[in-house]
């Protein structure tokens, strides 16, 4: 389809710039993904993560890179599919001017001399991160996650502790283990059929007892006991209900029935210890039958946007976050 330049709008262009399947995760989610990888698939760590010590300038680059690409595309429709910054000096000039004016307004000192001084400082700071700009605009590196050296070392420490914990050993002995197991299941929602996709951190199947354990690793800055208070806020009950439902659909047949349980293996960075919580029938029932399920917010699971709950409506229902857990 041929699109005339004068008919383009910023909102239209954003649909080309933004890749909804590779949205920017929070640092906490990236850290959790790193621990998952180190613990369950360590051979993939170098291929999936890049170490770069980001600072506030990197944050400014992240927050403005899409806007820069959009304004390029507005000027030149032939660049509609461009995702790489080819002229870093031009980008640094554009961003430093934007940041300088914003800082001047914030400081209520909007004189040309002040703006020029701010602009020169920002320009040098941006150019000092040329490697970072090349990384985030390189299509061959687009699927890699950028983490700091500090987070890398902390994640290594976490993964080693979890690997040697009694809770990890418990599941390793409980049956045949699979790690980062991908599951796909079609589900009928009120608005139609959706194909749901999930990745189970640790999947344990015991053929003798006909039991399946879904183990979801959660790393938290909170204390062990505080984890209970965030299950509802971050929609972990919905995640548990989806995974249990999908696994039952995949494995329970006319002649073979499995009992499926969902566990959170929680590691507290604050306390440097682990605990395992088993999701009770109450939690699974709430996640399965609540408004969240009925309205079909499957992208909470498919895109792992559990920490971005502000993008979704609030749901009002009674819930006591201290109930519904069993500790092993």
Image: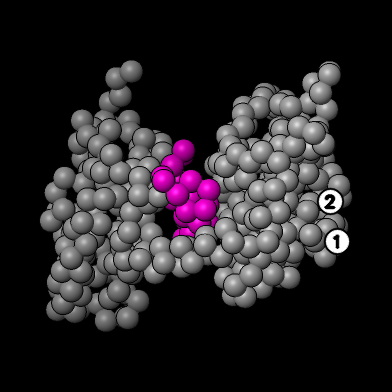
Dominant secondary structure of the residues highlighted in magenta in the image: helix
Q: Can the viewer see residue 281 in this picture?
A: yes
The answer to whether residue 90 is left or right of residue 99 is: left
Q: State how the image is colored.
A: one colour
Q: Are marks 2 and 1 in contact (CB under 8 Å)?
A: yes
Residue 219: image x %, image y %?
A: 59, 62
Instruction: Report helix, strand or loop for mark 1.
Output: loop
Residue 215: image x %, image y %?
A: 67, 48
Please give the name of the residue rendered at 32% of the width and 30% of the height, measured from the top-left corner. Answer: 7
Relative to 133, is 123 above or below?
Answer: below
Q: Which residue is mark 2?
A: 280
Residue 323 is labelled as 1
Cα separation between marks 2 and 1: 9 Å
The quarter in which the N terminus is drawn is top left
Please give the name of the residue rendered at 14% of the width and 72% of the height, measured from the top-left corner. Answer: 120
Residue 310: image x %, image y %?
A: 60, 55
Residue 186 is labelled as none
Q: Which residues are magenta?
A: 20-44
Relative to 79, is 46 above or below?
Answer: below
Residue situated in front as seen by the camera: 42 or 306: 42
Label located before the other in sequence (2 or 1): 2
Please give the name of the residue rendered at 66% of the width and 55% of the height, measured from the top-left corner. Answer: 169
């Amino acid at each position: 389809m041929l699109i005339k330049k004068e008919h383009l709008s910023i909102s239209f262009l954003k649909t080309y710039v933004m890749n909804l399947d590779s949205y920017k995760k929070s640092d906490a989610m990236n850290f959790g993904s790193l621990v998952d990888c180190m613990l369950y698939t360590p051979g993939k760590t170098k291929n999936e993560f890049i170490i770069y010590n980001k600072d506030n300038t990197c944050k400014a680059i992240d927050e403005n890179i899409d806007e820069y690409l959009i304004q390029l595309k507005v000027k030149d429709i032939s660049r509609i599919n461009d995702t790489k910054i080819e002229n870093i000096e031009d980008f640094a000039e554009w961003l430093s001017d934007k940041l300088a004016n914003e800082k001047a307004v914030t400081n209520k000192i909007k004189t040309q001399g002040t703006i020029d001084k701010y602009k020169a400082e920002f320009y040098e700071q941006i150019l000092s991160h040329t490697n970072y700009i090349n990384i985030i605009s390189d299509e061959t590196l687009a699927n890699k996650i950028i983490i700091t050296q500090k987070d890398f070392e902390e994640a290594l420490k976490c993964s080693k502790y979890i690997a040697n914990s009694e809770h990890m050993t418990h599941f390793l002995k409980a049956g045949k283990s699979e790690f980062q197991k991908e599951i796909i299941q079609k589900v009928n929602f009120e608005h139609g059929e959706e194909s749901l996709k999930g990745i189970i951190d640790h999947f344990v199947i015991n053929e003798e007892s006909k039991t399946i354990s879904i183990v979801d690793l959660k790393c938290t800055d909170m204390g062990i006991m505080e984890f209970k208070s965030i299950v509802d806020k971050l929609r972990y009950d919905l995640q548990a209900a989806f995974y249990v439902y999908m696994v039952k659909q995949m494995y329970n047949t006319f002649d073979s029935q499995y009992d499926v349980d969902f566990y959170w293996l929680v590691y507290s960075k604050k306390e440097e210890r682990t605990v395992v919580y088993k999701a009770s029938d109450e939690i699974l029932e709430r996640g399965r039958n609540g408004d969240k399920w009925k309205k079909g917010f499957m992208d909470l699971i498919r895109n792992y946007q559990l920490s971005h709950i502000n993008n979704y409506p609030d749901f009002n229902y009674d819930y006591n976050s201290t109930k519904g857990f069993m500790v092993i």
